[in-house]
Image (spheres, grey):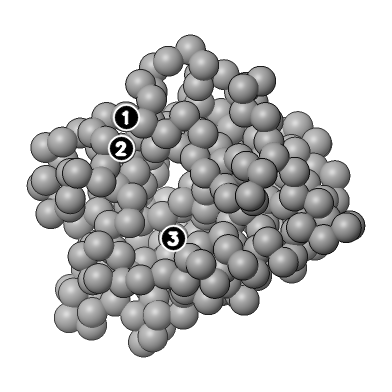
């Protein structure tokens, strides 16, 4: 973290948080090296974290002018938390970042460069599961996270409108996954978008409640208005997937949200077609 002077930022970094402050601390510490000389402002939206844990951690951030903390006593869900955090800023780019993602050096700079293309609406990154020892140290289940393997390089749909992570579990150094490519969607765990487009499509749809599918829905809306979704594999993060949900035993309305998504995107005007990931 850095104590920068308050200057007009290029990127607003919005981090929704529910506990897991050790990971949030690592997430924040990685941001300066990830963005280099690019000016940013961080907006942490606390989604009803345990009060004592939150009080103890947030007092350590009070001297940082580039970090603003917005606290809510209830968990509003991922989409609403992201929207509320984004409304606090006015930078031309918004980067939605999960608190359990640790960015690698230069990753933010590479995403910003992708946004220079006028045809690009959203840019995502390569996410990798943490090493075995780091997963254990965070108190998380190693069995559901393939240590050091690829977690995300984009999302694609099949004929049943099920959306999945392409190449998940692969060796993250495999040539197939290490080129900039257009994709159907990227995860909201690390998603950069142009603010004017985010506003134009009316942000994340809060109908998805606690979350899931709102990120794919956002990508579909951006593609519908004529912009591309891209992934840059040189932009890398270590992703402790679902860390807060696992620790606090939170559930998500997966089936309900999938039904909402399919109803919206599989009608005559908004056909959700299978994505041929073999061409990637």
Q: Secondary structure at mark 3?
A: strand
Asked if the residue under mark 2 is in contact with the one under mark 1, i.e. CB atoms within 8 Å, the reply is yes
Measure the alpha-carbon separation of dots 2 and 3. 19 Å
Q: Quadrant of residue 154?
A: top right
Q: Answer yes or no: is residue 245 visible.
A: yes
Q: Quadrant of residue 54?
A: bottom left
Say left or right for 247 vs 193: left
Say left or right for 143 vs 181: left
Name of the residue lying farthest toward the bottom: 73
x then y, percent, for residue 157? 63, 43
x then y, percent, for residue 55? 22, 78
Mark 3 burial class by Cα count in 10 Å: few <14, some 14-19, many 20+: many
Measure the alpha-carbon separation of dots 1 and 2. 6 Å
Q: Which residue is mark 2?
A: 129
Name of the residue lying farthest toward the front: 160
Q: Which residue is mark 3?
A: 15
Asked if the residue under mark 3 is in contact with the one under mark 1, i.e. CB atoms within 8 Å, the reply is no
x then y, percent, for residue 85? 53, 69
Q: Which mark is residue 149?
A: 1
């Amino acid at each position: 973290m850095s104590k920068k002077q308050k200057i007009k930022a290029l990127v607003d970094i919005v981090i929704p948080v529910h506990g897991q402050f050790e990971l949030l601390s690592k997430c924040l510490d990685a941001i300066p090296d990830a963005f280099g000389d690019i000016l940013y402002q961080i907006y942490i939206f606390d989604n009803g974290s345990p009060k004592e844990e939150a009080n103890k951690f947030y007092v350590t951030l009070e001297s940082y002018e580039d970090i603003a903390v917005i606290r809510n006593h209830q968990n509003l869900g991922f989409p609403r938390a992201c929207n509320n955090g984004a409304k606090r800023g006015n930078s031309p780019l918004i980067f939605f970042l999960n608190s359990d993602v640790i960015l690698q050096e230069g990753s933010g700079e590479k995403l910003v460069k992708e946004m220079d293309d006028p045809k690009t609406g959203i840019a995502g990154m390569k996410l990798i599961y943490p090493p075995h020892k780091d997963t254990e140290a965070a108190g998380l289940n190693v069995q559901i996270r393939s240590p050091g393997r690829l977690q995300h390089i984009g999302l694609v749909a099949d004929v049943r409108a099920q959306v999945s992570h392409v190449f998940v579990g692969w060796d993250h150094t495999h040539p197939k996954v290490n080129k900039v490519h257009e994709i159907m969607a990227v995860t909201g765990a690390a998603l950069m978008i142009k603010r004017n487009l985010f506003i134009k499509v009316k942000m994340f749809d809060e109908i998805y409640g606690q979350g899931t599918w709102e990120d794919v829905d956002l990508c579909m809306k951006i593609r519908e208005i004529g912009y591309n979704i891209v992934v840059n594999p040189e932009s890398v993060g270590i992703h402790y997937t679902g860390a807060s949900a696992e620790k606090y035993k939170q559930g998500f309305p997966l089936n309900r949200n999938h039904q909402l998504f399919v109803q919206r995107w599989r009608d005559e005007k908004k056909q959700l077609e299978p994505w041929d990931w073999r061409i990637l």
